[in-house]
Image (cartoon, helix red, strand yellow):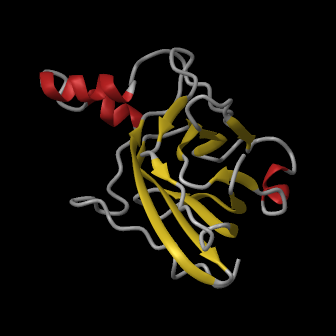
Amino acid sequence: MPGHEDDLVASKTEGFKVGEKKTIDEYSKLDAHDESLNRWKASLGLNAGEPIGDPNDPRKCIIKSLALEVQGRPDVVIELSAKGALETLKDKPFTIKEGATFRIKCVFQVHHEVLSGLKYLQVVKRKGIRVSKDEEMLGSYAPNTTGKPEYEKKFNAEEAPSGMLARGHYNAVSKFLDDDDNTHLLFEWSFDIAKDW
């Protein structure tokens, strides 16, 4: 996807140094008597069941689905792990009613090691001109286990633009990446702002 590299640059998490990541075992043994640290490890879900990651699948983060949530309407869900799902996104736009309040919901899995500072970046363009850039910090996550097989994160609510000039077709590019600058998913999609659903 040429031309998007400069748009999709994430801010750095303060105090994080690339490459200074611990293994799950090291995290588990870290200051075992420190109560606040133990609470933090529990919040990450460490030691909560057996790992579910496929040892033959090298992916550390799998984005399973994205959904568009609008109150009073059924969610529009995109199963990203379905074969060919990403390829059709760009050509099958969402329709969003002008002025509607909506939010994006993401379901994902973490495998093999602690994922530090997962972020979502989104750039929206209309007729080739950038109209918005958003960055959402999703946080740090331990690998999913039988006790917690997936994570769900709801983004901040947004309001669709309204008015005759706002209506029309928009192209977007989105990226999930972490503090180590690993890109876990990069995809293009599109949506139409319309007078009604």
Q: Position of residue 81 (x, y in %)?
A: 75, 42
Q: Is residue 166 above or below residue 68?
A: below
Q: Is residue 181 above or below residue 144?
A: below
The answer to which image quadrant residue 76 occupies is top right
Task: Report the residue at 73% width, 52% height from top.
Answer: 94
The answer to whether residue 54 of the structure is visible from this angle is yes
Q: Position of residue 161 (x, y in %)?
A: 53, 62
Which one is nearer the viewer's eye here, 101 or 63? 101
Which one is nearer the viewer's eye here, 97 or 49? 97
Q: Is residue 186 above or below residue 165?
A: above
Q: How many marks?
A: 0
Describe residue 96's horizontal placement relative to residue 159 as left or right: right
Q: Position of residue 14 (x, y in %)?
A: 23, 61
The answer to whether residue 56 of the structure is visible from this angle is no
Q: Is residue 23 above or below residue 98?
A: above
Quarter holding the N terminus?
bottom right
The answer to which image quadrant residue 28 occupies is top left
Task: Report the residue at 57% width, 45% height from top.
Answer: 60
Describe residue 14's horizontal placement relative to residue 76 as left or right: left
Q: Position of residue 156 (x, y in %)?
A: 42, 46
Which one is nearer the viewer's eye here, 30 or 109? 109
Describe residue 188's horizontal placement relative to residue 68 as left or right: right
The answer to which image quadrant residue 142 occupies is top left
Task: Report the residue at 78% width, 55% height from top.
Answer: 86
Task: Report the residue at 52% width, 31% height from top.
Answer: 151
